[in-house]
Image: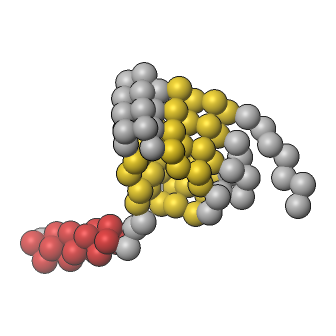
Amino acid sequence: MKIKEIVLSTIMIMGATNAHSLVINGTNELDIYGSESFVSAFDSSTITTHVGSSVAFLDGHDTSTFNINGGDISWLELYDSNVTNISYVEDLS
């Protein structure tokens, strides 16, 4: 049983090291046009997603602002006093 646990732990750690993550805080702003795995916002930061973008996990803390103008978001978690603006932007390409 211990061997299985060790192998599973190793796989989980190896998988986590390949993940791409971004953390912004303060009054920083981030525009997402491409693909991101994990994006976290803290304090008064702002994240904006655009048409064609893809985010696996997006989470906000404190008083972050999210402007969702398109793209795919698999998981959205909001804590504290976040502001989320969701608008539909048509992809004309």
In the rendered view, would you say 52 is above or below 81?
below
In the rendered view, would you say 57 is above or below 42?
below
Please name the colour scheme applied to the rendered image.
secondary structure
Comparing 53 with 12, the one in front is 53
Q: Is residue 49 left or right of residue 76?
A: right
Residue 2 shows in this picture: yes
Comparing 84 with 29, the one in front is 29
Which quarter of the figure is the C terminus placed in?
Answer: bottom right
Looking at this rendering, what residue extends furthest in the top direction? 81
Q: Position of residue 82 (x, y in %)?
A: 47, 27
Looking at this rendering, what residue extends furthest in the right direction? 92
**Which residue lies at the image location 45% right of the left edge and 51% below the top edge?**
39
In the rendered view, would you say 61 is above or below 69?
above
Q: Is residue 41 left or right of residue 5?
A: right
**Which residue lies at the image location 63% right of the left edge and 30% below the top edge?**
85
**Which residue lies at the image location 65% right of the left edge and 52% below the top edge?**
72
Which quarter of the figure is the N terminus placed in?
Answer: bottom left
**Which residue lies at the image location 90% right of the left edge and 55% below the top edge?**
92
Q: Position of residue 37 (x, y in %)?
A: 48, 60
Res 4 quadrant in image: bottom left
Q: Position of residue 67 (x, y in %)?
A: 62, 37
Res 62 quadrant in image: top left
